[in-house]
Image: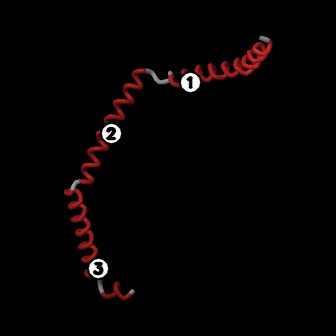
Amino acid sequence: MGELIGLVAVVMIFGIPMLAIWTKHQKEMRQHTGGIADGDAARLVEQVEVLQDRVEVLERIVTDRGYDLATQIEALRDARDTVAQATTRSPKETTR
């Protein structure tokens, strides 16, 4: 019985401070997570859903073959404009 009392004493010496630290931590965590009101949390969830929908639409647009085709057409127009500008330069401009 005497060795059991020693064991209980050691457990209590280390256990009580650890329990105090743990409960303090739990209390602080509750305070931090309680900082967002329920209405704000619902609004934020709704906003995230709206943004996810918008991202899905943008992904569909970018991966759509029509968008790729439009991008290629614009690139060809830009290339054509560059060639047209190069051929319309005067001889003085090309010798520089």
* Badge 2 amino acid: Gln
Quadrant of the drawing holding the C terminus: bottom left
Where residue 37 appears, x then y in whole percent?
Answer: 45, 21
Residue 69 spot, x, y in % from top left:
21, 61
Instruction: Give the spatial CA distance, label 1 vs label 3.
Output: 67 Å
Give the Cα separation between the discs numbered 2 and 1: 29 Å
Distance from disc 3 to disc 2, alpha carbons, whole Å, reads 45 Å
Q: What residue type is labelled 3?
A: Ala
Q: Earlier in the sequence, mark 1 or mark 3?
A: 1
Q: Residues within 10 Å of mark 2 (few under 14, many from 20)?
A: few
Label located before the other in sequence (3 or 2) = 2
Pinpoint residue 31: horizontal percent, then vertical percent.
Answer: 55, 21
As helix, strand or loop, the secondary structure at mark 1 comes to: helix
Q: Front-most of 45 and 12?
A: 12
Observer-nearest residue: 93 or 70? 70
Amino acid beneath label 1: Met
Scheme by which the image is coloured:
secondary structure
- Which residue in the structure is indicated by mark 2? 52
Residue in view at x 33 percent, y 38 percent? 51
- Residue linked to disc 1: 29
